[in-house]
Amino acid sequence: MSLNGDYIISGIMGAGKGTQSKKLADAIPGAVHFESSSVIREFIRTHTAAHDEIGVIIQGYIDKGELVPDEIIIDKIVEPAVSKILEQYPPSIIFDGFPRTVRQAEWLSQKLARYQRKEHARVIHLTLAETPGEEEVEIVKRRAENRLVCTGPEPHTISLDQMSSSGVCPYCESSVEARRDDMDENSRNRRIKEYTENVLPALQCLEQTCNMRTQRVSGLPAREAVFNDIQKALQVMDQEVMREHAQEYRVRI
């Protein structure tokens, strides 16, 4: 199975978006991992250092726990960054945690269509329960209390049960620390609310309005098992495309 194509990896906090996005990007030569939070943080850092007011404005929204308006996220940050990537025609772009609102979803669908990439785009919705609700929220809370962040050159999350006996990252032996937003209950609740009120509608928009192929995959198993399930889900979507193309061919003849 060829993994070339663009992928949107989304889901509730703690479902493994970053881990699985990185694994997918590593599996595709030349793929670009577009991690929206990192792009936004770098934008704030560079513009604040340059004494550009926009960096301060964005940081102000974040500090108050408010969503940065779409017109800023899209026009000032994502549009220039994604356009630069698309102009290089990479075999695959992994959109990690983006889009997060309906307007962002509509923008991304139109952008990929403009570059004739939409037909080959796939959406993976990582979940922690069969249906969104209290069960998934409780799992999120347990996972948040059980995960740490590696402080090495390529930051990633690890669970407490993966820790080495020496108390360092088992993969690169860098130090680890708890995520501050995981430990803060208000921050957790805000992120869960954002997922329910904004990310879920964005995913529904991608599937139902933008007609982008979508598969739900459980993020509960071990990371390798989840990645295998993602590959199976992608294969299912590819088979659907082949059947549709075969049907269209039979109709034409």
Image (cartoon, rainbow, N blue to C red):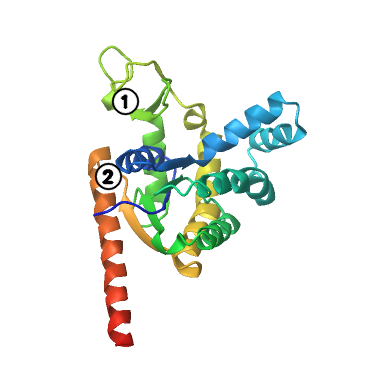
Classify the position of the C terminus by image quarter.
bottom left
Q: Foreground residue, 117 or 232? A: 117
Seen at 46% across and 49% down, the residue is 89
Q: Nearer the viewer, mark 1 or mark 2?
A: 2
Please identify the quarter of the rendering in which residue 47 is found.
top right
Please identify the quarter of the rendering in which residue 65 is found.
top right
Q: Is residue 165 left or right of residue 52?
A: left
40 to 118, vertically: above or below = above
Q: Residue 195 at x, y = what percent?
A: 50, 49
Query: Which disc, if any, is residue 227?
Result: 2
Q: Residue 75 at x, y = what percent?
A: 67, 49
Q: Is residue 130 visible?
A: no
Q: Is residue 108 left or right of residue 54?
A: left
The Cα–Cα distance between marks 1 and 2, rounded to whole angstroms, is 20 Å
Tell me which amino acid carries mark 1: Leu
Q: Which residue is mark 1?
A: 160
Tell me which amino acid carries mark 2: Phe
Q: Secondary structure at mark 1?
A: helix
Query: Which disc, if any, is residue 184?
Result: none
Label 1 Cα neighbours within 10 Å, binned few <14 / some 14-19 / many ≥20: few
Label 2 Cα neighbours within 10 Å, binned few <14 / some 14-19 / many ≥20: some
102 to 247, vertically: above or below = above
Q: Residue 161 at x, y = what percent?
A: 27, 26
232 to 219, vertically: above or below = below
N-terminal of the two: label 1 or label 2?
Answer: 1
Q: Secondary structure at mark 2?
A: helix
